[in-house]
Amino acid sequence: MKSIQSIVVCGAGTMGSGIAQVAIQAGLKTIQFDLNESALAKSKETIQAQIKRLVEKGKLSEDQKAQMLGLLHFTSSIQDCKADLIIEAIIEKIEVKIELFKQLAAINGPSTILATNTSSISIDAIADGLVEPSMLVGMHFFNPAPIMKLVEVIAGKHSSPEAIELLMNLTKTMGKVPVLCTDSPGFIVNRVARHYYLEAMEMVSNGLIDIESVDSMMEAAGFKMGPFKLMDLIGMDINFSVSNIVWEALGKPPRLTPSPLQREKVANGELGKKTGKGFYSY
Ligand SMILES: NC(=O)c1ccc[n+]([C@@H]2O[C@H](COP(=O)([O-])OP(=O)(O)OC[C@H]3O[C@@H](n4cnc5c(N)ncnc54)[C@H](O)[C@@H]3O)[C@@H](O)[C@H]2O)c1
């Protein structure tokens, strides 16, 4: 394959929706797949609103808007998921991701690249569950995907060099900055950033400071978002899974122990912006 012309984005949640928007803005024929019809409807609404805003800001013309939205199709049927590249952005659970990739591999040809947007699951561990592990690569976008420039491209030990090169080039075509990473727990950003969340929750749990003060101080210190606002944006379920996966993969070091605050928020269904309540209410 010389270049990627068509994409399937699996998952229409926070990340899948943003990645699909990035794909159509780069002129790629894009199918968004989710088992949940209401997630698809919400994603469609979000993408349309975002593109409309770009027109209002004068960054896109009406013609460009029509062209971009014409590239995007939504489906809840896996049989429609055929493309040069599949980007998976579903729930952060290895067994669910492997099962999905197995089904996708059976539907697609051997040259289709399978990319996972996982935040923390080992690329090799997913690839080991597949018949053809060389086509699996990590492609980790950051939230919100249409705005954040960085993309970690993660090479597993089986990943095909040609697939990696195609993804590095595609990322640049999308106006992003790719960084090639090796497959290690949390890759780069999520490993370094663990402490940003965990230390903040530790201080709040110990009654040393309140949530609002931590956020406003970190923002005053130059961080774009305080840790609690950022966790609400990421989604508590996703961030808690990442905390657990990184902690376990590194041999459970005490410094990275997931916080009881995260566990409590997940148990209460207070997942952040996507459910209307997390550390803050929306
Ligand atoms: N939220 C973030 O800030 C962030 C950032 C980078 C990477 N990620 C990663 O991206 C992935 C998705 O995260 P998210 O925050 O978008 O999650 P989300 O909860 O917002 O959305 C997940 C979507 O996947 C769908 N889904 C679940 N199982 C499915 C299946 N078998 N087939 C098709 N669709 C299915 C759900 O219906 C849901 O709409 C995760 O692997 C996460 O670690 C998240």
Image (tube, helix red, strand yellow):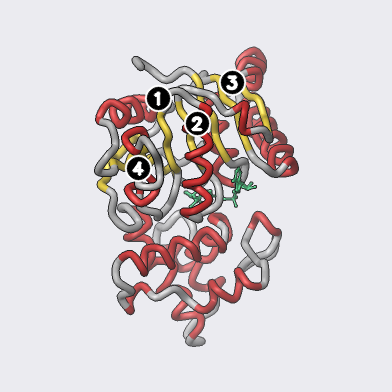
Q: Residue at x 43, y 27 (%)?
A: 174
Label 2 vs 4, first from the N-terminus: 2
Structural distance between the alpha carbons of marks 1 and 4 = 24 Å
Q: Can you identify the residue that label 3 sits on?
A: 60
Q: Can you identify the residue that label 1 sits on?
A: 110
Residue 150 visible somewhere in the drawing: no
Which amino acid type is marked by label 1?
Pro
Q: Position of residue 81 (x, y in %)?
A: 57, 28
Q: Position of residue 40 (x, y in %)?
A: 69, 38
Q: Can you identify the residue that label 2 sits on?
A: 106
Label 2 vs 3, first from the N-terminus: 3
Q: Nearer the viewer, residue 140 or 59?
A: 140
Q: Mark 2 or 3, which is nearer the eye? A: 2
Label 1 vs 4, first from the N-terminus: 1
Which amino acid type is marked by label 2?
Ala
Q: Mark 2 or 4, which is nearer the eye? A: 2
